[in-house]
Image (cartoon, grey):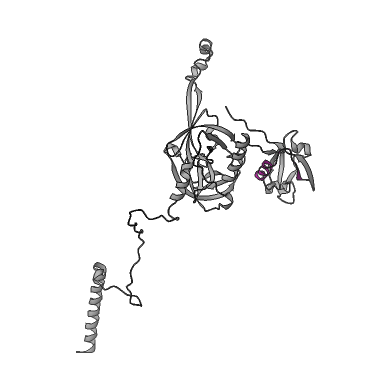
Amino acid sequence: MSLRTLWLIFAQTSTIALGVLFVIATLRPEWLPIRTGGSGAPVRIAFSEAPRAPEDGAPPPASSTTSYSVAVRRALPSVVHIFTSREVKTSRSPFFDDPVFRQFFGDALQGIPKRATGLGSGVIVSPAGYVFINNHVVEGMDDIDVASNDGKKFRARVVGFDPETDLAVLKLDADNLPAITLGNLAQVQVGDVVLAIGNPFGVGQTVTMGIVSALGRSGLGITTYENLVQTDAAINRGNSGGALVNASGQLIGINTAILSPSGGSLGIGFAVPVSTAREVMEQIIATGSVTRGFIGVEARELTPDLVESMKLDSEAGVEIAGLVPEGPAVRAGAKVGDILLTIEGKPIANPHKMLETVAKLHPGDTVLMQVRRGPREIDLRLTVGTRPKPVRPR
């Protein structure tokens, strides 16, 4: 037998053997021996499996990266449902505005008493029964009812309100209530996981999860004093006044508004930071209202175009665009067109920073305000006034 014949037999045999091996490996891999590593130990494929339950049948503890149940258990009892109502009058018919009808029936048929209702959430921040709530939830309401997560119901009264931060404080007629733990805003970072707890659309206590999308948001026109926490956790009607908590269940904000052309959650929600809420609460509990400094200045941001048109050498400061007649700044010698640089040595970078700085001044104190007027920098001393109180609508 020639070598060529032997080679052909070997090649055909090898091809057939490889084909049979491929079919077995595909259809019946269990017929093949287990492969081993270099040490001789079997090489096995690793699968991710849920840990087995303990012998007593209790479920295994959840990983902190996959469950926030502990944070929810800590915060949930402190978040309450707010139900509000007020009496309104609606016209039964446009004919009742006719002078003939008014001559015979007067105002008796001009309107029918009706109850307008509202919905929101609140956060218990003291065992004595003090509750954070958004001002727009309780503004102008006659009756305020509060229900806890365990079904208990309370009557509430408004201790005080602050429309300029959209916050109000309620007092429940109860003691030993489950108060939430206040977090530290200085430790909050963009990207932190947060949970929004509230009563959206009245469906019941609901938790949604997201992250901190941004900090210190301002210039949105939501409130006068804005230093808002932005989140993508779902916030809807009924969530207002509810808690925004961190992964430990600590309060870091009061949910207050969303940006949405449709009115539904699109992932851009805002919360009043806990630091602001705490300052407001302490003043309201102590005095029933919030007192802020006032200098009587309307500021305008210095844009590059404005800097160029005014021939300024920098964008530092804000332009004084208006002054309250006989206000503190006018009495100190400020003029429209001055560039406000600092207040008590603190740089004023934008109108929001000016509002924030002035609000923390104590009425009656004398402070130094530095302005640029033309090429000169001028120091003005003024006596801080009291910011006028907002009027609560009836």
Residue sitting at the far bottom? 2
- The answer to which of 140 and 31 lies nearer the viewer is 140
Picture residue at 23% right of the left edge, 71% below the top:
31
Residue sitting at the far front? 176
Picture residue at 78% right of the left edge, 43% below the top:
380
Which residues lie in the magenta part? Answer: 351-370
Classify 27 as above or below 232: below
Q: How many marks?
A: 0
- The answer to which of 382 and 266 lies nearer the viewer is 382
Classify 34 as above or below 263: below
Residue 223 position by quadrant? top right
Picture residue at 47% right of the left edge, 43% below the top:
197
- The answer to which of 86 and 221 lies nearer the viewer is 86
* Residue 357 belongs to magenta span: yes
* Residue 17 belongs to magenta span: no
- Rendering coords of residue 36 (x, y %): 32, 75
- Res. 209 in view: yes
- Res. 23 in view: no
- Quadrant where the N terminus sits is bottom left
- Quadrant where the C terminus sits is top right
